[in-house]
Amino acid sequence: MAYKTVGLIGKSAHEGTQISLAAVIDYLRARDCTVLIEEHIAEEFAGNDIIPCSLVDIGKQADLAIVVGGDGKMIGAARVLARFNVDVVGVNRGNLGFLTDINPDDIQQQLDLIFNGDSVTEQRFLLEVEVFRHEKLKSASSAVNEVVLHHGKVAHMMEFEVYIDDQFVFSQRSDGLIIATPTGSTAYSLSGGGPILMPKLDALTLVPMFPHTLSSRPIVVDANSAVSMRVSKVNSSNLQVSCDSHIVLPVLPGDEIRVRKNPDRLSLVHPKGYNYFTVLRNKLGWGSKLY
């Protein structure tokens, strides 16, 4: 694909990010691209040909957005960029790098593949969460990885009921519940004992957090399901819903949390040769072939 306008997103005052952003800028200049850069890092890079922009404006104007950082930076940008028709690729300057898969030591070769069309594009769906109080919408947000209902205090149990498409599934006493997308199945959900879902699966995983009954197990459901969590009125008031661990929505006893698939899609681009199972082996330390 011919990318002519490219937006750059990264963490400010981070040495490794600055080095990679500088290399990306040199690459884009050599290709005569229009370069947009997120406002809060624009001052770190001089040049009249670099245009400071908000993240929303990058989404509106760019053909390609390059996120330099870790998965957390990618997830934060993705919640905004998914609303627009823009491809997104990540340069890994974090730890795991499930979503940011360009090696910072190999930027030119990897970007050459993407700019020459030797790439793989995936459509990743997001979640939409709404908190209702007395049937009135109190707050809402979106998530790339997961929506988590939990107590505000550590190691504090809560009681709630789960419904799928208005059908009662179970009641539970636990520390909370993780509802994860396939993208998020290798994040917090995995730490909680949830299954790994391949990115193309149209499914969600519901993972109980330290449930009081041993029979409570993760369950995989159709991603087009409407999931509802109804919080018991007997709980204390210090309850929360977290979205990707970035956004926190307050919850009171008696509230209802509704989660469903967001209509937006993140268009995630990988250089040719990308293989999901190779990523899993490398990031999770799985064994390689015996021979």
Image (cartoon, rainbow, N blue to C red):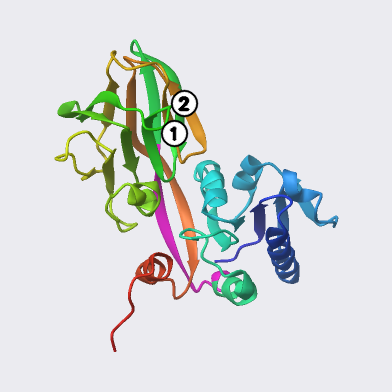
Q: Are marks 2 and 1 in contact (CB under 8 Å)?
A: yes
Based on the picture, tell me whether residue 38 belongs to the magenta stretch.
Answer: no
Residue carrying label 1 = 242
Quadrant placement of the N terminus: bottom right
Q: Residues within 10 Å of mark 1 (few under 14, many from 20)?
A: many
- Real-space Cα distance between discs 2 and 1? 6 Å
Task: Give the number of marks.
Answer: 2
Identified by mark 2, the residue type is Leu
Q: Main secondary structure of the magenta part?
A: strand
* Magenta stretch in the rendered image: 114-127
Residue at point 26% right, 40% down? 224
Q: Which residue is mark 2?
A: 249
Quadrant location, the C terminus:
bottom left
Query: Residue 76 location in percent, x, y?
Result: 55, 44
Identify the amino acid type marked 1: Ser
In the picture, residue 149 is in which quadrant? top left
- The one of 125 and 185 positioned closer to us in this rendering: 185
Q: Nearer the viewer, residue 257 or 38?
A: 257
Q: Is residue 123 magenta?
A: yes
